[in-house]
Image: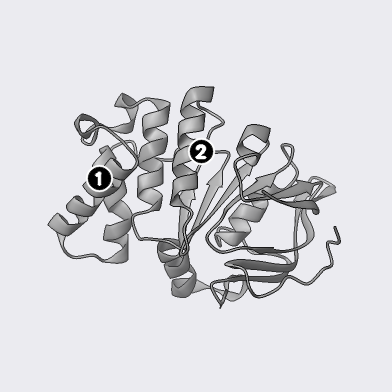
Amino acid sequence: MSNTAVATSSGAAVLEDVVKHFKSGSDTVHAVDGVSVAIPRGKLVALKGPSGCGKSTLLNLLGALDRPDSGRIVVDGADVSGLSGAAEVAYRRDKVGFVFQMFNLMPYLSAIENVMLPMELRGEPNAQGRRTLAESLLSRVKLAPDRHRRRPTRLSGGEQQRVAIARALANDPSLILADEPTANLDSTTGEQIVGLLRSLASDDRTVLIATHDNSIARQADLVVTMRDGKLVGRDEG
């Protein structure tokens, strides 16, 4: 498919000719090299490709963890590529849920406290309300109640990823970005996590998973394939 095709405005997320390059010594790495694509609302989307093809960079750009060198990124009508300061922080906090390969839980907080943290950062004043919602989210991701007050080091990898998904849902984001969320899990646990992520895609929420795993891609509503920083395929599930 053509990388220069203009993405339509019908998607939950729209990228138009997005470029992000990095310097590596005397070389330039073309991490994202003129990508245009519309990510549909309410779908599970797999961003597929080998390691180093630009998947993680693209997720970081969508999540406003990094800024493009050029091009435009629009999520739910907001021009993410133009955000800065408090507006950028609010976007990351309220509109996007992140699920990382290495879980990235706060080690000194319990599972339930990790899930409550985004609510506190948002300014939710009702401590009991935060705790009740966190318990509900942990139940939704099927973490056993006796694990809610354990710190990450006392949880299995699969349990930690469930906590991370519950944390990503804490502020009810419209976009969930999952970067290789099953890479550190055994195959059975990985399948459970993908099933859980799939269940989160709804009319109001889009789930985008970066992966090189074909078994995950087969479960997606849409597969977008990257190679060497470019978009090289788009297949409806």
Tell me residue 2's x, y (percent). 86, 61
Is 98 positioned to the left or the right of 50 in the image? left
Q: Amino acid at mark 2?
A: Val
The secondary element bearing badge 2 is classed as: helix
**Residue 58 in the image: x percent, y percent?**
66, 54
Q: Give the camera-side residue of 124 and 208.
A: 208
User: Quick one: which residue is furthest to the front in this view?
Assistant: 237
- The numbered dot on residue 127 is none
Vertical side of 160 occupied by 9: above or below: below
Q: Is residue 109 visible?
A: no
Crowd band around label 1 with a 10 angstrom C-alpha radius: few (<14), some (14–19), many (20+): many
- Disc 1: which residue: 113
For the N terminus, the quadrant is: bottom right
In x, y percent, where is residue 196? 44, 41
Q: How is the image coloured?
A: one colour
Asked if residue 102 is positioned above or below residue 169 in the image, the reply reads: above
Q: Residues within 10 Å of mark 2 (few under 14, many from 20)?
A: some
Q: Secondary structure at mark 1?
A: helix
**Residue, x 31% and y 44% (percent of image)?**
140
Q: Amino acid at mark 1?
A: Glu
- Quarter location, residue 7: bottom right
Q: Does residue 13 appear in this view? A: yes
Q: Is residue 77 above or below residue 170?
A: below
Image-based side of 99 in relation to 180, left or right: left
The answer to whether residue 140 is left or right of residue 14 is left
- Identify the residue at image location x=25%, y=38%: 110
Q: Nearer the viewer, residue 28 or 70?
A: 70
Which residue sits at x=37%, y=25%?
156
> Label 2, on which residue?
194
Name which residue lies at 31% across and 64% down. Answer: 122
Q: CA distance from mark 1 to mark 2?
A: 24 Å
Mark 1 or mark 2: name the one nearer the start of the chain: 1
